[in-house]
């Protein structure tokens, strides 16, 4: 069974496992944003701070989506 289904250039979760992976990635990104934004002095500080965490998380989510039901 597929976890994700392609929707244009993005992926849409279609199973419980897909939703759990997506929600875990979203929760991690929100937690990182809140932690870094509380110590930032400007918008650029926040962006520079979240970049090293968000990019690998989004790439990992895209890789999982591609491997578990993406385009073949």
Image (cartoon, rainbow, N blue to C red):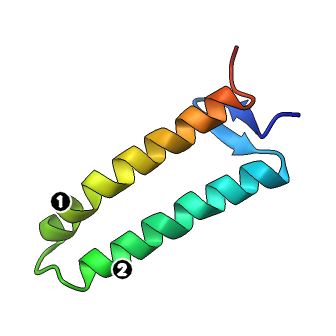
Left or right: where 65 falls relative to 3: left
Image height of 54 relative to 28, above or below:
above
Q: Quadrant of the N terminus?
A: top right
Per the image, the residue denoted by label 1 is: 48
Left or right: where 69 falls relative to 39: right
Pick out the residue farthest to the right: 1
Q: Residue at x 28, y 62 (%)?
A: 50
Q: Residue at x 64, y 36 (%)?
A: 65
Q: Quadrant of the C terminus?
A: top right
Q: Position of residue 62 (x, y in %)?
A: 55, 37
Pick out the residue farthest to the bottom: 38
Q: Position of residue 32 (x, y in %)?
A: 37, 70
Q: Residue at x 25, y 86 (%)?
A: 38
Image height of 17 relative to 32, above or below:
above
> Distance between the Cα atoms at labels 1 and 2?
14 Å
Q: Quadrant of residue 11?
A: top right
Q: What number is the disc on residue 34?
A: 2
Q: Secondary structure at mark 1?
A: helix
Q: Residue at x 75, y 29 (%)?
A: 69
Left or right: where 14 falls relative to 23: right
Disc 1 and disc 2 in contact, CB within 8 angstroms: no
Which is nearer the N-term, disc 1 or disc 2?
Answer: 2
Pick out the residue farthest to the top: 72
Q: How many residues crowd mark 2 within 10 Å: few (<14), some (14–19), many (20+)?
A: few
State the residue in front, 21 or 38: 21
Q: Quadrant of residue 21?
A: bottom right
Tally of numbered discs = 2
Q: How many residues crowd mark 1 within 10 Å: few (<14), some (14–19), many (20+)?
A: few
Q: Position of residue 42 (x, y in %)?
A: 12, 76
């Amino acid at each position: 069974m597929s976890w994700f289904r392609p929707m244009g250039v993005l992926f849409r979760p279609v199973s419980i496992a897909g939703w759990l992976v997506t929600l875990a990635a979203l929760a991690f990104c929100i937690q990182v944003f809140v932690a870094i934004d509380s110590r930032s002095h400007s918008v650029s500080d926040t962006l520079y701070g979240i970049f090293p965490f968000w990019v690998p998380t989004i790439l990992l989510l895209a890789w999982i989506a591609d491997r578990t039901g993406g385009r073949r």
